[in-house]
Image (spheres, coloured by chain):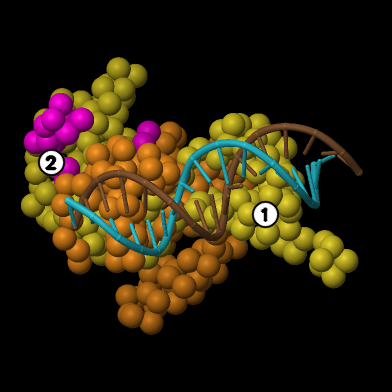
Chain colours: A yellow, B orange, C brown, D cyan
Amino acid sequence: MMELDTIDLRILRELQEDASLSNVELARRVHLSPSPCLARVKAMREAGLIRRSVALLDAKQLGLHLNVFISISLKQQSRAALEAFEAKVCARDEVMECYLMTGDADYLIRVAVPDIAALERFILEQLSPIKEVEKIRSSFALKQVRYKTALPLALPPVSARRRRATQ
Amino acid sequence: MMELDTIDLRILRELQEDASLSNVELARRVHLSPSPCLARVKAMREAGLIRRSVALLDAKQLGLHLNVFISISLKQQSRAALEAFEAKVCARDEVMECYLMTGDADYLIRVAVPDIAALERFILEQLSPIKEVEKIRSSFALKQVRYKTALPLALPPVSARRRRATQ
DNA sequence: ATTGAAAAATCTTCCCC
DNA sequence: GGGGAAGATTTTTCAAT
């Protein structure tokens, strides 16, 4: 764990929205000079707080028109069964997210597929054959209303810096 | 829409995993010289295929220990009701994803919160007061088995390039 | 359309405050 | 912990294939 001050949080907020920012531009935005700004970024990177930078693509343009949530119950909930299931599911590239859940189903996964045929193939050829699986129920997303990767940061609303003086 | 050849797909695959790659290194990995590589990236960026680059943070280190899926049914499904609900939900920073769904519930959202108290506050103060909302049911993620942002790309498995000759 | 090289701009590292 | 100068990449542009 790491101590984060207001400036750190502002850096994180910026990088969560645009990781391609140059250090100079980032420093400008958080009202710092480039060197300490870079030092902070580096520290947060090394602490594992900033895990990595990735490019987000347009699913529609790649022909991935369907987001499907699939609830899966296993026959038994032994550690071995859970691990076996997880390994098989994580090996599939269309599985964007997978959560072990409370409630009626054991797992909830989101898959991104081009069409219903691909979903059918995924369920019949990948999911059903897994011997630990008992029950599968899928729900389609009609619309992706929101999808973001930026985690909520408890940012002090308006920092108490004196803009005129600092400027 | 855009015509994508094998090299484009390989570029996308790399950038989906690491957007901080320099153009030189990226070009090396896809067996291209820097200039056409940069031109391709630029074209895909301008086409909107590459939407943006973002930093992924460690939720645990930020104290966000809970992922909760919340199913929400509305009293009515008029366009106005849907839009009103969506606007209110998207305004909240803890809502990472929101989907309009088929099946019993109307919406499925995933929220990232520090603890149960924060979840309770979110539900009681943000969700319940929305007048369009009829029913709320939440399920906790006990474990985030997989979370990735890289979309599945139909990559030709082993490209038919002649490594020795090209080298 | 790709390659390779050269020029310009930028970032990163070091040292001082 | 923050600010300023030098070295080193990187991106861009251009001409040639």
Residue B93 circle label: none
Residue under the point 54% across and 63% down: B92
Q: Residues within 10 Å of mark 1 (few under 14, many from 20)?
A: some
Q: Which class describes the residues within 10 Å of circle 2: few (<14), some (14-19), or many (20+)?
A: few
Identify the residue shown where x is 33% and y is 47%: B34
- Quarter of the image for residue B49 reads bottom left
Q: Is C1 placed above or below B163 here?
A: below
- Pick out the residue farthest to the top: A80
Is A92 on the left or on the right of B156, as rendered?
right
Identify the element where label 2 is drawn.
loop
C-alpha gap between disc 1 and disc 2: 42 Å
Please check the rendered image and state whether residue A161 is part of the magenta-colored stretch, yes or no: no
Dot 1: what SS? helix
Residue type for callout 1: Ala
Q: Can residue B138 be seen in this view?
A: no
What range is drawn magenta here? B145-167
Identity, as a three-letter code, of the amino acid under mark 2: Pro
Looking at the image, how many numbered discs can be counted on the residues? 2
Q: Pick whichever, B130 or B63, lies toward us.
A: B63
Which chain is home to disc 1?
A: A
Q: Name the residue under label 1.
A: A27
| Quadrant of the frame with the C terminus of chain A | bottom right
Residue that numbered label 2 is attached to? B156
Circles 1 and 2 on the same subunit:
no
Residue drawn 75% across and 64% down? Answer: A158
Magenta stretch holds residue B148: yes
Q: What's the residue at 13%, 30% (across, down)?
A: B165
